[in-house]
Structures are given as structure tokens and as C-alpha cells.
Image (tube, grey):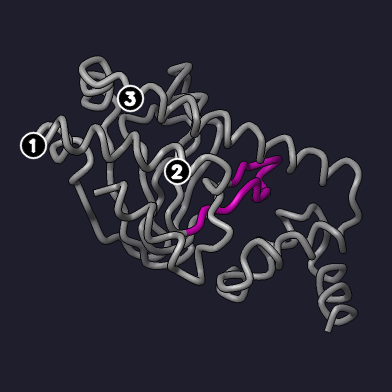
């Protein structure tokens, strides 16, 4: 049950900075309400759990999504290809939803690639099945609005950091947000995410140590 998984984020030391932190107290009772009212219908939509291996692509550029994911365990990255070079845009950590709004909401081919950086356990949620459930249980519309608003907030924070903070400050933020997982991410991806070279990242890390 998603309400229980999200509630666990308050007790898991590695999830103390869960990206849903701003709205999680509102989301949990809404999910719990639907879980109780929908029963088996809910499990049909949110009960598809799978174990996936490192390197698995959840979506590739140009694809149309039919699902999105809830990441129970593991790390994923979102990246673009720019002139044949990978540019890391974001990371996903345990107890986060993974989605590409351009395709899930606007129904456009994905402009991003999302790939697992570690072995992972995910819930696979089908868009069409979820839409039917949302139409029967309006609380899920509220959940969606809260999650989208929450992600927009973090996107604004990310844009601000890129425009106005130094690379060192941006690296400090990443360290603060994910102290338990930062060492599991290859430095090449971190440098790309920060918009700096690997050499510059090495100098920042050495200075901070």
C-alpha cells in the first residue's frame, strides 16, 4: 500500500529528504482513503511490483509512455542526448514517483531518457488503468495535483540553483539532500547534473574534504 510506503519515509534515515516532503502529509491520508474504498480495484492499479536490474531503461527518448513508476528501492537518472553527449537532468531516489509529464499528461513522445543506476524495486502504474480509477475515486485527482505542484516547486529550485548558485553551492545542496546515496552515483553523472567538468567536480570535492 502506497500510504504505508510513504509513511515509512518518516522512519527511514535514507529518506529524510524525500522529494515529496512538502506534500506528503496531505498525500498519505488521500491514498489511505482510496485504498480503503477501492480495495481490489486499487491493488490492480498499484500492486504491480517488479525487481529491475542496473542499466534498465524505464523510458527512452522518442517513446510514448503507457506507465509511470513508484521507486521503492534504488536510484535512477533522467538525461538528454545533446549532440550525442549525455546530459544528466535529474536523479530519482527511493520513495519517489518517476514520470515524464510531457508524455504522461501532454501525450507527446518523451524527450528524456530514464535509466536505473542501481538494481531497483518499482511499482509499475498504468496510465489508462489509473485514469479509470481516478474517475471513480476523486481523491486521486487531488493526489496528482499535489505531486505535480510539488515537482514544479523543485524544478523552480533547480532552475534557481543553475542560474544563481555556484557549482560548489549546487554540490553542497546535492550532498545535503542525498547524503546516503551520493556515493552510489558515478561522478560523471554528478558532474553532468551540476553542469561542470569532471575535473572541476574533483577540485570541489577535494576542497570540501
Residues marked 3 and 1 touching at CB (< 8 Å): no
- SS class, disc 3: helix
Q: Earlier in the sequence, mark 2 or mark 3?
A: 2
What whole-number distance in Å separates the C-alpha atoms at marks 1 and 2? 24 Å
- SS class, disc 2: strand
For residue 40, which numbered disc appears in the image? 1
- The image shows residue 193 at horizontal and vertical percentages of 71, 54
- The image shows residue 131 at horizontal and vertical percentages of 27, 20
Q: Earlier in the sequence, mark 1 or mark 2?
A: 1
The number of numbered badges drawn on the structure is: 3
Q: Is residue 32 above or below residue 85?
A: above
- The image shows residue 16 at horizontal and vertical percentages of 54, 63
Q: Is residue 69 above or below residue 50?
A: above
Q: How dense is the environment of label 3, judged by Cα within 10 Å: few (below 14), some, or many (20 and up)?
A: some
For residue 139, which numbered disc appears in the image? 3
Tell me the magenta residue range.
Answer: 79-93
Pick whichever, 33 or 199, lies toward us. Answer: 33
Q: Earlier in the sequence, mark 3 or mark 1?
A: 1
- The image shows residue 109 at horizontal and vertical percentages of 47, 24
Q: How dense is the environment of label 2, judged by Cα within 10 Å: few (below 14), some, or many (20 and up)?
A: many
**Disc 2 target residue:** 98
Residues marked 2 and 3 touching at CB (< 8 Å): no
Asked if the stretch drawn in magenta spans residue 36, the answer is no
Which is more foreground, mark 1 or mark 2? 1
Amino acid at each position: 500500500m502506497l500510504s504505508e510506503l510513504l509513511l515509512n519515509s518518516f522512519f527511514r534515515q535514507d529518506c529524510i529528504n524525500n522529494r515529496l516532503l512538502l506534500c506528503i502529509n496531505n498525500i498519505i491520508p488521500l491514498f489511505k482513503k482510496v485504498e480503503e474504498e477501492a480495495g481490489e480495484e486499487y491493488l490492480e492499479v498499484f500492486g504491480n511490483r517488479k525487481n529491475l536490474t542496473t542499466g534498465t531503461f524505464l523510458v527512452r527518448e522518442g517513446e510514448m509512455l503507457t506507465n509511470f513508476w513508484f521507486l521503492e528501492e534504488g536510484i535512477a537518472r533522467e538525461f538528454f542526448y545533446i549532440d550525442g553527449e549525455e546530459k544528466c537532468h535529474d536523479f530519482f531516489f527511493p520513495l519517489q514517483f518517476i514520470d515524464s509529464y510531457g508524455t504522461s499528461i501532454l501525450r507527446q513522445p518523451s524527450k528524456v531518457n530514464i535509466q536505473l543506476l542501481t538494481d531497483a524495486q518499482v511499482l509499475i502504474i498504468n496510465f489508462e488503468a489509473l485514469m479509470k480509477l481516478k474517475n471513480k475515486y476523486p481523491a486521486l485527482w487531488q493526489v496528482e495535483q499535489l505531486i505535480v505542484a510539488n515537482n514544479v516547486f523543485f524544478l523552480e529550485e533547480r532552475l534557481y540553483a543553475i542560474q544563481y548558485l555556484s557549482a560548489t553551492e549546487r554540490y553542497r545542496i546535492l550532498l545535503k539532500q542525498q547524503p546516503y546515496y551520493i556515493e552510489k552515483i558515478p561522478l560523471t553523472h554528478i558532474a553532468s547534473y551540476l553542469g561542470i567538468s569532471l575535473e572541476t567536480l574533483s577540485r570541489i570535492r577535494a576542497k570540501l574534504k
